[in-house]
Image (spheres, rainbow, N blue to C red):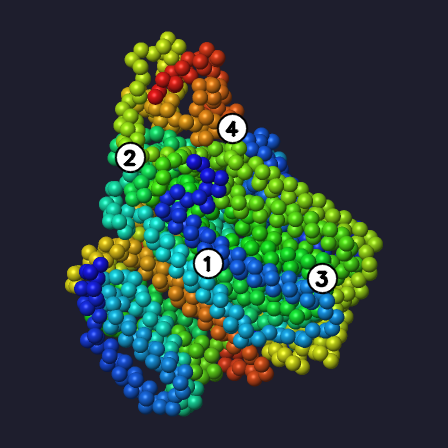
Amino acid sequence: MNSVIPVLDPASPQAEAINSLFLQVLLISAIIFAIVAGLILVAISRGRRKQTLPKQDFGSEKSEIYWLIGPVVIVIWLVAISANLVITLNAMPGADPDGKTDVSDIDLIVTGHQWWWEVKYPKSGVITANEIYIPADKKKKFRVQISSADVIHCFWVPQLGRKIDAIPGRDNYIWLQASEPGSYQGRCSEYCGAQHAWMNFKVYAVTDTEFDQWVASEQLANKQPKLLSPLANSGKQFFFQATCPQCHTIYGTPAEATIGPDLTHFARRKEIGAGVIENTPENLALWLKDPQALKPGCKMPDFKLSDEHLKQLVAYLETLK
Amino acid sequence: MSSYFDLTSGLWKWSSPVWLLVLSLVGLYIIFHHRALGKRIVFFAFAMFALALAYVSPIGVLSDGYLFSAHVIQHLILLLIVPLFLLLSLSESETEALFRHPFMNRLGSVMAVPFVGWLSGLGVMWFWHVPSFCNASTENYALGVFRDATFLLAGLAFWWPIFSPLKRFHLSSSLAVIYLFSACLGCTLLGIYITFTVISVCPAFANPVDRLGIMHFLYDQGMTPATDQRLGGLLMWVPPCSLYVCAIMVVLKRWYAEMDQLTSPQTAGTTSSLREAQS
Amino acid sequence: MTTGSVEQSELTSLEPPVTSTLLLDWVSTLDHKRIGIMYILTAVFYLAIGGFEALLMRIQLAFPNNTFLSPEMFNQLFTMHGTTMVFLVGMPVLTGFANYFVPLMVGARDVAFPRLNAFGFWMLFFGGLLLHFSFLTGSAPNAGWFSYVPLSSKAYSSLQGVDYWIIGLLIMGIGTVSGAINILATIICLRAPGMSLQRVPLFVWMMLMQAILIILALPALNSALAMLLIDRWLGSAFFDPTRGGSAVLWQHYFWIFGHPEVYILILPGFGMISEVIPVFSRKPIYGYTFVAASSVAIVLLGYGVWAHHMFAVGLGMYADIFFAVGSLLIAIPTGIKVFNWTATLWGGEINFNTALHFAVAFLLQFVIGGLTGIMFAAVPIDWQLTDTYFVVAHFHYVLIGGLVFALFSATYYWFPKMSGRMLNERLGILQFWLWVLGFNMTFMVQHFLGMMGMPRRVYTYADNPGWALLNGIASLGAVFMAVGTLVFLWNIGASLLRGKIAGDNPWDAFTLEWATTSPPPPENFTVIPEIKSRRPVWDMNHPENADWKTEKTPADRGIRPNLAKLAAWAFIASEAVFFLLLLIAYVIFNTRSGEGAVTSSVLDVTRTGIFSLFLISSSVTFWIAERFLRAGKQSAFVFSLGLTILLGITFLAGQVWEYAGLLTNDITINTNLFSATFFTVTGFHGIHVTAGVIALFVMLMMGIKGNLTADKSHVFGAVGVYWHFVDVVWLAVFGIIYLGLLQ
C-alpha cells in the first residue's frame, strides 16, 4: 500500500490533520497567487497598449492600510490553526491530552545509526532493525522515542505524520499510529553522511493479533532448527571465527555487539542494507560479497570472502528466522 | 473540565489594592486632562483596564507564586503596555503646561537622554530576573509592590523618548530605531536565557505553595515548572519585540513625514554621528 | 565631528599610474566601478562552477539507481554547490552591483574607503580559491552547506574538507563584512547635497539594509565556525554530545546567521526590482515609504525567526509556535512589497522589454516561493515537508526565481550604463524563455518530488513510481537553463563589440546614475543635478512634471557623520555580536553543575579583578589623551597615550599569568566545557586587546613624529571607539565568567 504521493495520502489521524492543514494553506496560496498573477497580467496587457504618460501616482497610505487587512487576517488565521495542531500533536511525556503522563511510558525506541535504524520495544524487549511493527488501530498511539547513536538523522514516515530529528545526546518523542493495516515507507530525512540515500525503513501496521504473534515470535531466540545442514553449520562456525560478532548480535549466542544491526531474526526481514535490496538468498550473497559495491561507504567492510565461505554464510544466515 | 469552573472564582481577585491606584490615576487624569479628546480617553481607559487586569484577573493571581509565565505577562503589562498608553493618553497642550515649570522641564530632558530610558527599561527587566531578586520579590509582599512600582516608572522612562507627548523630548529617528532595536535585542537575550537555561530563574515558582489547590490542574495542563519557565522566556521575548518593531514602524512613519519643519536639535552634539547611521 | 557639510574623502591621488599594464591596472585598481565589475566577474566565474556542479548532480539524479557519481562525490558536489552559490555567487554579485551603482546613485565620487574595498574583494577572491583548492586535495567539504555537527566534527569528517570550508568562509567573511561597512559608510556619509536619506533610490536603501544585516549577522557564523575549528583542531567539545557538548547549538548559531542571510540575498533583489518596474512603467514606485519601511521590518524580524529552520529538531511546542508566529509575521511586510510592485505596474505605460520580462517573472516566481515559505512557517506542514525536495524547490524559487531573475533584470537594465551599449533584445527574450521554461521545469516538479517523499541530499533513489519521470524532467530543465546562460553570455559578448550605442539615459530613467555618461568617467560626475525629490533625473528631464512640485519629501539637513567613526561603530557592532554569542555559549555550557575545572576551583578572581582595573583605567587615560590631542597639547597626549598602552600591556601580562597557571595545572582548552569556553572567550578578547595595543602603538608613533594632530583627532577617536569597546567586553566577560552572574 505504498502510495505514490504519500504526503497527500495520509494513513494516520495526525497525518490527516496535517494534510488538511496543508490543503487549506495550499488553497489560500493558490487564491493569493491567482489574484497577484491576474492583476499583473492585466496591468501589463493594458499598459502595453498605452501610449501616453501615465499619471504620476505616488501611492496612498489608505489603500496600503486596506491592503494590509487581508494578509493580517490570513496570518492570524494561520497562526491559530497551526498552533492548535502543534499542541495536539505534542508527544512529550507529561503533556498528553489522553492522559498518558507517565514519563517511562514509551512503546518504542528508534535509534538512528549511520546508515540504519535500530528498533527496540522496551516493554517486550524485542530488538530489530529497519522494520517497525505496530498494531493498526485508530485509537492506539505508540509513543516513540527517537535518538541517535552518532550524527543527526531524521525519522520520517510520510503517510503516518510528522518527522522528527534523531539527535545524539537528546531524546525526541512522536506519536506513531496507523489507521489501516499496511506497509508504510519511511526514510531518513536529514543528511547524515555518505549513505544518507539508503537509510530507509518500513512501518508495518498489522492487526492486534498479528502484532501479538509477531512480538511473541520475536521475543524468542530464533527458531533455528536444532540440526543445521552441514553447509549452514560450517557457515555458523565461520560466522564466529570471523569478525562478524564484533559488530552484530544473534540472541542466545556469544555474538552480542551492537555496532551493526541485530541479526537474531535476520532471515525474516524483507530488505537488506536499510532498503538497498530485497532480502533473498541471492541478494544476500551479493551483499556479503561486497557491501561496498551495493552501499558505498557503509560501515560493513568488504571482507573479500571466498565463494565457499559466502555460500556457507548465506546458508547460516538464512536459518535465522 | 468542571474543575476549571470551580476554580475560576478563586482565580479572580476583586479585592486587589490596585483599585486605589486606578482611582487616583483617574482622579489625576480628570483634574489635569478634563479637556481630553476621544482618542486619548480611549487610550487612558485602556491603560487603566490593563493595569487593573494585571492584578485582578488570573494573570495577577497566578503570578503571585504560581506561574512564572503569568508573572511575565503581568510584568510586561506593567512595564510596556500601561506606561505606553498612559503617555499616549496625555495631550500635548496640557502636558506642555505642566512641563513649562523649570524643574519639570529638567526632569523631562533627563528622561529624554536615551541612556536613561534604555537602562531603566532593560535594567528592571534584567535586575528582577536575577534569581535571588526574583525570588525575594515574589515571596516578600512589600518588595513585590516596590518591584511593580519600578516597572511602571521604568516603563514611563523607557517610552518617554519615543512617545512623550512633547516633541522636543523625542529622540531623533535613527537613534530611536537603534534604541528600540537594541532594547529588543536586550529582551531577546533575556528571553533566550530564561527559555533555554536549565536552572530555575525564579525558584519560588518551581515549588509553589498551593494556596488555591490548583497545582494539580496546572500540572495536568502541562504547565510543569520547566514548561512554565520556557513559556515565560518566550513571552519575555516575542511580544515585547513585536511591540518594539511596531514602535519602530511608527518612528519611521514620523521620519518620512519630517517635511520642512526640522525637529528640535536637542540631540545634536555627540549623538549626531549616529543620527543617520542605520536608520 | 563633521556635521553640516558633505564630506568627500581624500581621493585625489587614486588614479593608477599611466605606465602600468592592463592586467596590473585592474588588479591594483581602487576604482569602485572596476572593483564592482571584478566582483561581478568573480561571481560569474563561480556561477559557472556552481552551475556545473548542479548539472553533474542533475545527471546523477536523472535516473534511479544511477552510478554516474559516487555518493562521496555527490555529497561534495552539493556541499560545494550550496556554499559556492551563497557565498561566492549571491553575495559577491550583489556586492558588485552595489559597488558599481551605490556611489553613482547617491552622487558620490567613489565608495567611502577605496582601499578597504579592494581589500574586501581580494579577501573574497582568495577565500574562494582556498575553498575550491580543497577539490585538489581530494576531499572537498562534504557536510552540506550548513555543516551540521556532529557530522562535520572530526569524528565523522576526519578529512580536511571541512577545515577548508571553515577557513574559506572565515576569510570570505572578513571580506564581506568590510564590504558591507564600506557600503554603509558610503550611503550614510557620501550622499550628494540634497539627497536626504528619505530620498535615496530604493536599491540604495535595500543595500543599506543589507549592509546592516551583514554586519550584525555574519559574526554569528564566525563564532560558530571558530568553535567548530577549535573542536576540530584543539579537541574541545563544544559540539560533541558524548562529552557534554550540544549538537543543537550549532544549528542555532548557524541559522542566527543563516536566516538573515536569506534576506541578505533577497533584499537587494527587491531593490533592483524596485528600480526596474517604475522605470518601465513610466511611473514612480507606488508607496515608496511602505516599500522602504517594510524592509526595515523584514530586517528586524529576520533576526528573530531563525529556529523555523529547526522545527524538526523538536525544540518543544512553545518554541515552535513562537517561531512560527515570527515567521508568519514576515509575510506581512513582504506582502506589502508585492502589492506595491503590482500597483506600480497598474496603470503604467508598460515598456515590456527583457528587463521587465525578468522583473515580472521575478514577481510571479517570488510569490510562489514566498507562499511555499508560508507553508513552512505553519509548523505541522514543515514537519512533513522540510528536508525534502519540497524545501529544495521552495528556496530555489526564492533564490533563482527571485534573486537570479532580479539579477538578469538588473543586468539588462544597467548594462547600457556599464558598457555604453545596449544588450540585444531578441537574444534577451530568447534567454528569458529558456530560463523561465528551464527553471520551472526543474523546480516546479520538485514540489511534487517532496510530497512523494524524496528527501533532499540523496545521491540516488529507488525506482519508485513517478520518481524517475519527475527527476528526468528536472534534469532536462537544468539543460534549458544552461543553454539560456550560454545565450546570455553570447549576448553580453556580442553586444560589447557591436551593440547599439546607449547614450546617457536610454530608458528615460529616474535616478542619478543616468545623469552621467555611459560608461561613467572615473570621477563619476562632472555636474550633479539638483536633488529635490526621489527622482532627480526625472525632474531634470521632465521639469513640467517634476516630483517635488507634487510630492513633498523631507529635505536634506546636510548631516554627514564622520566616516572613520561610523566605520568604527559599525565594526564594533559586528564584534559585539561575535562576543555576545561566545558569551552565550559560555553561559549555556556552564549553567549545569560542573565537574572538574570550574571558575571557583581554578581561577583567581581577586587577582584578575585587580588586573581588570588596569584595563578599565586605560579607558580613562585614553579619554584624557583624546582631550589633550584635541586641545593640541602634544606632549601630554603622548604621555597619556603611552600610559594607556602600558596599562593595556599590564592587563595582558595578567592574562598570561592566568593562562600559565592554568596550563601548569594541566587545564587546557580540551579539558572540559568550562575550559573550552573560558579559553575561547578570554583568548579572543586577549587577541582584541593585543590588536588594540598595536593600533595604539601606531598612534603613539604617529604622535611622537607629529603626524597625529588635533585636526586628525577623529581617526584617533575611531581607535578609541574600539578600545573602549574592548574594555566593555571585558566587563561583561568578568561579570559572567569570574563573578558568575547568570549562573
Q: Marks 2 and 4: in contact by CB < 8 Å?
A: no
Residue at 46% from the left image edge and 52% from the top image edge: A23
Q: Which residue is mark 2?
A: A208
Please tell me if label 3 and label 1 are on a single chain. Answer: yes
What kind of element bears circle 4? Answer: loop
What kind of element bears circle 2? Answer: helix
Please tell me if label 2 and label 3 are on a single chain. Answer: no
Q: Marks 4 and 3: in contact by CB < 8 Å?
A: no
Q: Which mark is residue C352?
A: 3
Q: Which mark is residue C327?
A: 1
**In the rendering, at what x and y percent does residue B245 appear?**
46, 68
Looking at the rendered structure, the kind of residue marked 4 is: Pro
Looking at the rendered structure, the kind of residue marked 1 is: Ser
Residue at 62% from the left image edge and 46% from the top image edge: C441
Looking at the rendered structure, the kind of residue marked 3 is: Phe
| Other residues around mark 1 within 10 Å, as few (<14) / some (14–19) / many (≥20) | many
